[in-house]
Image: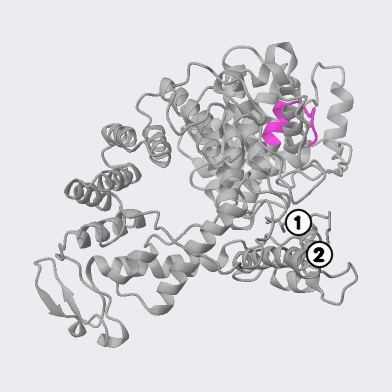
Amino acid sequence: MAATLYCLNRQDEAEKCWLAAIKTRPQYLEAVEHLVGLLYKKKSSNAVEVISFMQKALRLSVDPVEHVGYSSSTLQADTPTDLASNLLNDNRSQPGFGSSGYAIPGTENGRILALVHAKGTMLYSLKDIAGASKAFEEAVLISTGRRTTSVQTLVQHIQQVLAPNSGIQGATDPATPARPLLLAPEKARRTAKLVFSNNGDLPGLRFVPEGGPKRAAIQTTSNSLLSLAKIFQDAMSSGPLATGVARKSAGVGDILCLYYLSLSLQESPSTANNVGILLASVQQPATANSSGMSSSLPNIPGILPGSGLALALAYYNYGLTLDPKHVHLHTNLGSLLKDIGQLDLAIQMYEQAVQCDGNFDIALTNLANAVKDRGRISDAIAYYKRAVRSNPEFAEAVCGLSTALNSVCDWRGRGGALLQGGGYDRWHVGDDGMIFDATKYDQGSGLTKKVTDIVSRQLADASTWGLGVLQKSYIAVLAAQLRRAAGQSENAGTDFDLKLRSWSQTPWEGSRLLRLVERATRASMRQWYCDKYIRGLKTTSKYERPQLPSNLTVPSAPTVLPFHTFTCPLTAKDIRMISQRNALRISCSTLRSAWLPSTVYPPPPPPSPCLNVGYVSSDFNNHPLAHL
């Protein structure tokens, strides 16, 4: 009846009929599919409720699990409903019945998988990232036939299978993250076959009919893994609390395992791109824990074979074999090449990206930055203007255009900021190149106003960096390290634990923590200096370096660089904060480097007779006065 009403365009009545059918027989998945399809676009929250009702009605009990998954979605030991228990008793003899964790035949696993995946997609669109993460994790567990209790245990199984002799470093030390498992595309494509028996067949999809239904279920599983990995990757960039994910954060190695499995189920240029981005950020020796490197990879100066950069290059090239016109792959490959000093090759990649999509703001801006570094200022200005036309809110393009125009003294459209009611920056430059009195309009104008607004917004957002990283387990570890750095006993009077807890969940949490770790490092080095050169102790104990938490991301720096601030009408406070944010970024990035030892460096001897201090600028090319 509901289908008939729907065909007659009587959608409200069809919705009521399908809802009544679902309440009567939740196991009737076809009705659930039809109703969710009807509600998908206009009533996403209602569609989520329908799927949740179906899940609750059909969920079977499982053993309670102490282990907490990344998204806290491990199965609970709920008592199954009478309906689920009766269905299980009546159909226990059916092959695969209940293998999904729900009271449905194994042949229906693909259908409930698609519904749970749709739930995750809708929750993500509703900005409920934590709920979406749980739904995608549930979809993965359905496909694996409940062989693991959570995605976290699945990841551990993948790591053990692909690198059985590597061990899991950092498992016993919460302050030391495990080194990620680095796989070349050729081996990553075999992940499913190595992890699952029967030539890589997913256990939960064993009874799904061959052909279209099976292929669709495998694709849905791959997409669920991809979505879950992307959520965790975003959480690494913006912090777990910013995305709403998680009690226990996933590390780079965990995310890579999810991507490897997704890629082995369905080859995708987007997955290859995401893996490349992640691998490009991996800082570890080329020989450490890398597997399956291909000797056919291009030999580019600045890239060590087997390193994270080499594998990132391999995945970008692999992705381009799947889709030669993938604009993000060309752009990210160009950025990788630019970072290792291959500027001309980077420009070629950016140009190919722009050919694929002439309105892609990131590619246009990156191309502008690259040609500007080659001294082609007029070309850079043209690309910046195209990027701003494509996306007027793109900070990199707006600030880059302002800097480039300033460098050639092109003031047309510069405008101004109008500080302190016209006491500063009163005279602005219009689009015609003529100056005018901005006090008549009582507001800023032009490109400069856009730049100052961007800076203000970025500095305001900086207070949330690192929010929530001070968790109970890390506080205990850090407090003990601080006491040792201060030369105190374990029962000393200074209550570092209490102070750290007072910082948790407050603005500037990440900044305070980073400064504290830096000061504690200096204190540990001073203690070593005093022991060695003042007290004359020949101690063999190590002076450990306090560690940052593994879930503290490297902060982003304001788009306007410190040595460009004098070209913008900014307040003294803003200029100081821009320098501070850049310093925090450099410091955090360094303290998270794999080459940094776990102990502080030996202190230098006392001055004999003096200390020599010198400085060499690392960037003459991008200096605002370089054109003079």
**Helix, strand or loop under label 1:** loop
Q: Residue furthest front?
A: 609
> Few, some or many C-alpha atoms within 10 Å of disc 2 (few <14, some 14-19, many ≥20)?
some
From the top left corner, tell me how far across and down residue 19 is, in percent: 64, 41
Question: Where is 555 relative to 313, above or below?
Answer: below
Q: Residue at x 31, y 55 (%)?
A: 622
Q: In the image shown, does 412 or 37 lie closer to the viewer?
A: 412
Say which quadrant the N terminus sits in: top right
In the image, residue 415 sits, relative to residue 367, either above or below, namely below
Q: Which residues are magenta?
A: 138-149
Q: Nearer the viewer, residue 32 or 488?
A: 488
Q: Which mark is residue 311?
A: none
The reply to whether residue 157 is in sight is yes
Residue 47 appearing in the image: no
**Marks 2 and 1 close (CB-CB < 8 Å):** yes
Relative horizontal placement of residue 29, taking residue 318 as reference (left or right): right
Q: Classify mark 1: residues with Cα within 10 Å, few (<14), some (14-19) or many (20+).
A: some
Residue position for label 1: 544
